Image (cartoon, helix red, strand yellow):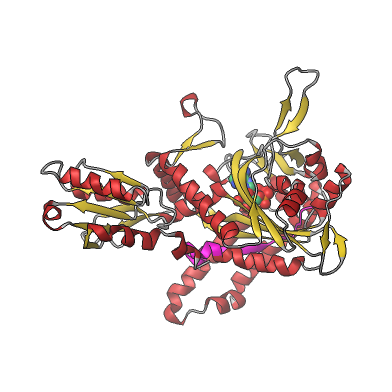
């Protein structure tokens, strides 16, 4: 399937199966805001839970927090968001369309990367088993040139953004002859900075109202609570605070479905360490977070690190874990070494000490911070788009199957009486009544069994349990596995163990 078609299919499937709906759809929707349907809410909850278990439950030096979305406005002065949370925007004078200048350039580089990928595929076909990808990348002249060109463009863009040299960002767009993707026009305005925070007001009367912001990241709620948690939890450095919750950004160009939203959810963890030890922890968290992703089995080739050339004002090292979405490799998670920037700044703006007494060193200091920050909705899109597959079966027919990792699947098993009579529905409902304490289940007695299997495949349900006439005689049922379509005859009494083995978080967390 072409990438564009695949992406359209992902969006359509997400709607058809109750995963994601456009917000306020009956009013023609609200741009870049989405609602999660009956299956989406479960998948999202399971991803959040899997992250929480890996971060908080598995690490006895990481604890959770749930800070409010609304925070004192000085928070955002101290964090730098009022002055520096900007994206460079550029308008096309002919099409009147607005773009993020850096995204236009990154998309240009993505096209160069696609050419490299094409060369790799061609060579892999030509050389067969003898193909050595690493050697090819290092020695093929055309590929080396492409790579150098892409790297040089990103480097120049990074440096110009860092120096706030927006004229050079525009010059780069012109030199690369980047055109408006919609119309092909190259008639661009100057590049300007645009602040992404949403403003709101607190208070009943207009005169006394206080200007607030909806938080653009969850991290600041952790920083301002650093001492509360450290003292009340008697935490010793190194330790972490984890949080999941909504964040809001008035994105300039919000497209690509739930990849870039104006209201989204983040899962962030700030790890507080001794000054000077931050880069060691940064490396260790990069590795740990990649392992978490790989544990879900979406394919190691779909991930890569991207080390930042342009560092945010608070960071001394930063990398993204990029994922191969249907529209190419894009950031899924950020890992940042944030130095002591945030705590020091909050200390200065609030006038309250935010320091830690290290008993081993016998001294006070402002801890350094390593952050891991992942968008829950982006993770949802990664899992969902990767899992959606069209398979050609032996008889030549196609089945659409959503191969979600079983631990994340919204519904773990479907209970299906073969026919709607002869007492089979009653037995099926009894099985549901017994298993519903352990798993989310669904019941379906409509249509032929084959069609019901296909419906569950497309829904991502890992197991189908069919009750038939033999069940009445010997208490056995058929269990069908979504991915292999294999069917086994098993005792009703064994169902719980069989399902548990594959959906239990333990099985998946042990791989992290
Ligand atoms: P991008 O470069 O894509 O705008 P960012 O570098 O601004 O992202 P961070 O501020 O590092 O993103 O946020 C951490 C994570 O939050 C990102 O890796 C991403 O998964 C998620 N995220 C950020 N912005 C959005 C958004 N508008 N919609 C959905 N998820 C987002």
Image coordinates for residue 183, horizontal then vertical, percent: 58, 39
Q: Which of 135 and 225 is in front in this view?
A: 225
Image coordinates for residue 322, horizontal then vertical, percent: 59, 59
Residue drawn at (81%, 51%) of the image: 343
Left/right of residue 142 with respect to residue 166 in the rendered view: left
- Start-end of magenta stretch: 292-313
Rendered position, 399 above or below 15: below
- Judge whether residue 103 can be spotted in this image: no
- Judge whether residue 36 can be spotted in this image: yes
- Screen quadrant of the N terminus: bottom left
Left/right of residue 332 with respect to residue 407 in the rendered view: right
Q: Which of 186 and 257 is in front in this view?
A: 257
Q: Does the magenta stretch include residue 109?
A: no
Rendered position, 448 above or below 463: above
Rendered position, 334 above or below 88: below
Q: Nearer the viewer, residue 331 or 500?
A: 500
Total numbered badges shown on the rendered structure? 0
Residue drawn at (57%, 37%) of the image: 32
Image coordinates for residue 376, horizontal then vertical, percent: 56, 49
**Outermost residue toward the bottom?**
130
Left/right of residue 493 with respect to residue 436 in the rendered view: left
Quarter of the image holding residue 190?
top right
Image coordinates for residue 141, horizontal then vertical, percent: 61, 74
Rendered position, 92 above or below 460: above
Quarter of the image holding residue 273?
bottom right
Quarter of the image holding residue 479?
bottom left
């Amino acid at each position: 399937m072409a990438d564009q078609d695949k992406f359209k299919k992902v969006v359509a499937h997400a709607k058809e199966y109750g995963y994601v709906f456009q917000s306020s759809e009956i009013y023609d929707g609200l741009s870049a805001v989405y609602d999660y349907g009956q299956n989406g809410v479960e998948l999202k909850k399971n991803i959040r839970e899997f992250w929480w278990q890996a971060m908080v439950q598995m690490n006895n030096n990481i604890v959770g927090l749930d800070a409010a979305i609304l925070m004192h406005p000085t928070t955002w002065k101290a964090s730098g968001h009022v002055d520096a949370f900007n994206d460079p925007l550029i308008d096309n004078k002919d099409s009147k369309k607005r773009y993020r200048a850096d995204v236009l350039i990154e998309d240009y580089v993505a096209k160069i990367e696609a050419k490299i990928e094409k060369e790799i595929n061609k060579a892999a076909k030509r050389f067969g088993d003898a193909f050595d990808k690493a050697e090819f990348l290092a020695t093929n002249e055309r590929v080396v040139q492409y790579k150098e060109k892409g790297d040089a463009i990103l480097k120049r863009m990074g440096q110009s953004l860092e120096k706030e040299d927006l004229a050079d960002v525009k010059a780069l767009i012109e030199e690369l002859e980047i055109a408006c993707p919609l119309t092909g026009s190259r008639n661009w305005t100057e590049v300007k900075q645009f602040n992404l925070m949403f403003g709101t007001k607190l208070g009943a009367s207009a005169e006394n109202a206080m200007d607030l912001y909806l938080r653009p990241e969850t991290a600041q709620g952790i920083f301002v609570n650093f001492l509360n948690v450290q003292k009340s939890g008697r935490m010793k450095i190194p330790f972490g605070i984890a949080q999941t919750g909504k964040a809001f950004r008035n994105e300039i160009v919000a497209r690509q479905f739930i990849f870039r939203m104006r209201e989204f959810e983040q899962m962030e963890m700030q790890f507080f360490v001794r000054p000077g030890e931050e880069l060691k922890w940064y490396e260790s968290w990069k590795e740990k977070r990649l392992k978490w992703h790989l544990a879900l089995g979406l394919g190691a080739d779909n991930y890569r690190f991207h080390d930042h050339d342009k560092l945010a004002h608070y960071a001394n090292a930063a990398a993204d874990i990029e994922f191969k979405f249907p529209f190419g490799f894009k950031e899924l998670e950020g890992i940042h070494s944030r130095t002591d920037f945030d705590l020091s700044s909050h200390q200065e703006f609030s006038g309250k000490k935010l320091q830690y007494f290290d008993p081993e060193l016998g001294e006070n200091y402002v801890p350094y911070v390593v952050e891991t920050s992942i968008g829950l909705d982006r993770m949802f899109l990664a899992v969902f788009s990767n899992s959606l597959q069209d398979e050609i079966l032996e008889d030549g027919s196609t089945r659409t199957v959503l191969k979600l990792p079983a631990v994340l699947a919204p519904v773990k098993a479907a209970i299906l009486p073969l026919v709607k009579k002869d007492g089979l529905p009653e037995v099926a409902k009894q099985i549901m009544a017994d298993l519903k304490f352990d798993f989310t289940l669904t019941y379906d007695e409509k249509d032929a069994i084959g069609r019901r299997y296909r419906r569950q495949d497309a829904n991502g349900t890992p197991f189908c349990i069919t009750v038939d006439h033999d069940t009445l005689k010997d208490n056995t049922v058929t269990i069908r596995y979504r991915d292999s379509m294999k069917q086994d005859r098993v005792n009703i009494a064994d169902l719980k163990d069989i399902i548990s083995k594959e959906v239990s978080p333990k099985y998946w967390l042990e791989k992290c």
